[in-house]
Amino acid sequence: MFSRDKYEDSVVINMLEEKLDGTCVLMELSNFSNKKMSDVFSAYTDEVGDFTKTSIPMKNIFDASPISRSQAKRVCNRLDNFKEVVFDFSDIEWMGQSFAHQVFVVFSNQNPKIKLIPINMNDDVKKMYNHVMIGKGKADEQ
């Protein structure tokens, strides 16, 4: 593994031989991507270049479907730094009422200037979303 940080020189570490304390973050990038950096940045920034948007791929966070308020609170932690948040429900089979209510009612009411955008909801996820939004008076067809 190639390791680089701002405090030490670059090193190559044999992961099988060395046991290190700390957090490990892995990232893989394609050498053959057709993406343009300007397109990537413009998807998450406003006109002046501030990062105002984020996207949360729910399948990367949960092994199973999100169900609890505590899970929702963890997901919403620091989302108040953005103006627009996309929740991508691809490959999520369903979500619990407590999770949906905490995100789309409680968090939304506490942060009315933040636009929450759920996408790729299957029928079961959409049903729970609509259920909590009806109570909020804002059910719509996503």
Image (cartoon, rainbow, N blue to C red):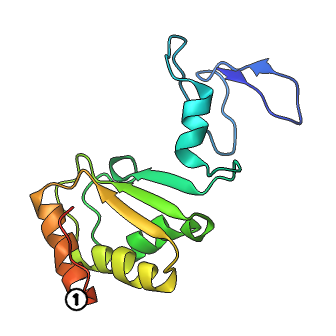
- Say what secondary structure mark 1 lies in: helix
Please report the residue visible at 30 percent of the width from the left and 51 percent of the height from the top. 63
| Residue 123, percent from left and from top | 10, 59
Identity, as a three-letter code, of the amino acid under mark 1: Gly
| Residue 125, percent from left and from top | 18, 63
Please report the residue visible at 50 percent of the width from the left and 11 percent of the height from the top. 32
Whether residue 26 is visible to the viewer of this picture, yes or no, is: no
Q: Does residue 100 lie above or below 63 as drawn?
A: below
Image side of residue 46 versus residue 35, left or right: right
Please report the residue visible at 28 percent of the width from the left and 53 percent of the height from the top. 89
| Residue 92, percent from left and from top | 23, 53
Query: Which quadrant is home to the N terminus?
Result: top right
Image side of residue 13 versus residue 80, left or right: right
Identity of the residue furthest to the left in this view? 123
Identity of the residue furthest to the front in this view? 47
Query: Which quadrant is home to the C terminus?
Result: bottom left
Image side of residue 52 versus residue 123, left or right: right
Q: Does residue 136 lie above or below 70 as drawn?
A: below
Where residue 41 sits, quadrant-wise, is top right
Where residue 38 sits, quadrant-wise, is top right
| Residue 3, percent from left and from top | 72, 25
Q: Which residue is mark 1?
A: 135
Please report the residue visible at 58 percent of the width from the left and 21 percent of the height from the top. 16
Q: Does residue 77 lie above or below 33 as drawn?
A: below
| Number of marks drawn | 1
**Residue 44 versus residue 127: which sits nearer the camera?**
44
Where residue 80 sits, quadrant-wise, is bottom right
**Residue 97 versus residue 7: which sits nearer the camera?**
97
